[in-house]
Image: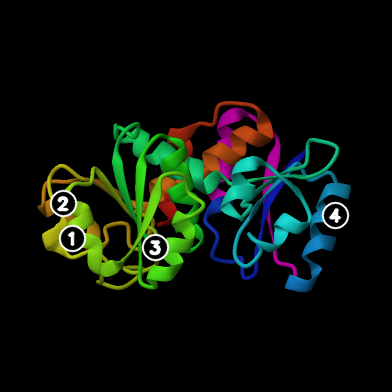
Amino acid sequence: MHVFGIIGNPIGHSLSPPMHEAAYDELDLEGRYVTFEPEPEDLEAAVDGADALGIEGMNVTIPFKQDVLEVVDADDLATRIGAVNTIDFSGPTPTGHNTDAVGAIRALRDHNVALEGSTAVVVGAGGAGRAIAFGLADAGATVDIANRTESTAHELAEVVPDATGHGLESLEELLADADIVVNATSVGMETDETPIPAGALHGDLAVMDAVYRPLETRLLRDAAAAGATTIDGAWMLLYQGVEALEIWTGEDAPVETMNEALRHRL
C-alpha cells in the first residue's frame, strides 16, 4: 500500500484527497491519500513521523508552508520562493518542493499562453504571488508585481529576476501593455469583488485567477466580456497536484481524471 497525504491546520476543506485518489485508481496504484492536522508546534515531529512510517509524499498547506523549510532539504525553487508545498520522502532525507509555481505555469501553457518574452502582471505579493512571480520569471516573462502595500511588492521584485514592484493604483497603466495578468490575492473568494478594474482589461490579455471558489469570479466575467482568454483557479490547483504526483511516483499523471474529480467537488 502506497500512502501519500497532506499536512495543514485546519485541513478538512482540502480538495486534494479525491483528486489524488482518482489518479491512483486510473494508474492502478494501490494507494491512499490521507489528511494530517498536527498542532503548529508539532510540525517537525509530524514530518519525522511520516518519514519513519514510510509515507512516500505529502503536500503542505497553511500554516506550514514556510515553517517546513526548517525540517526538509528544500530544492532551489522552493528556497527562492521561501515556501514548500510538497515533500518527497524517497531520498535519504525529506526533500521540499514548491509545485504552486509549476502549477501556475502549466495552467497557463495548457491554455496556449505564450510565456517566453511576455509581460506579466501579478496582483498580490503574498505566498501565491511569490510562487507565481518566480514561475513566470523562470519561464522567460518580464514580471510586474502590484500589491496593496507597495513596499511589499518592491521587496518581492528585488528577489524575482527582472521584476518591478508597484502599488495597485498602477494597474491600469501596467495592464495596457501586458500579455498576462494573474490575481494571486483572495479578493473574489466567495464574494462578488475583483482586484482589477474592468476598464483595464482588454482582448489581448490572458487572465488567470488563483481563486477557485467560485470558479467564475467577477474578474473572469469582466475579462471574458473584454474578449480576454480566461483561466479559472482550479487549473492551478489541478496542476500543482499533478506535479506533486509525478514527483512522488515518477509516472505521468492522468490529468483529465484528476480534473474531473476536482471539478466534481467544486
Q: Position of residue 3 (x, y in %)?
A: 74, 44
Q: Residues within 10 Å of mark 1 (few under 14, many from 20)?
A: some
Residue at the spot 35% in from the left edge and 42% down from the top edge: 142
Q: Position of residue 154 (x, y in %)?
A: 43, 62
Query: Over which residues does the magenta segment extend?
Result: 18-39
> What type is the residue that disc 2 sits on?
Ala
Q: Nearer the viewer, mark 3 or mark 2?
A: 2
Give the labeled residue for mark 1: 172
Q: CA distance from mark 4 to mark 2?
A: 49 Å
Q: Nearer the viewer, mark 4 or mark 1?
A: 1
Image side of residue 259 versus residue 230, left or right: right
> What type is the residue that disc 3 sits on?
Gly
Q: Residues within 10 Å of mark 2 (few under 14, many from 20)?
A: few
Give the labeled residue for mark 3: 124
Q: CA distance from mark 3 to mark 4?
A: 33 Å
Q: How is the image coloured?
A: rainbow
Q: Nearer the viewer, mark 1 or mark 3?
A: 1
Q: CA distance from mark 1 to mark 3?
A: 15 Å
Q: Position of residue 57 (x, y in %)?
A: 71, 44
Q: Residues within 10 Å of mark 4 (few under 14, many from 20)?
A: some
Q: Earlier in the sequence, mark 3 or mark 4?
A: 4
- Using the rendered view, name the quadrant where residue 88 is placed: top right
Q: Secondary structure at mark 4?
A: helix
Judge whether residue 263 is colored magenta.
Answer: no
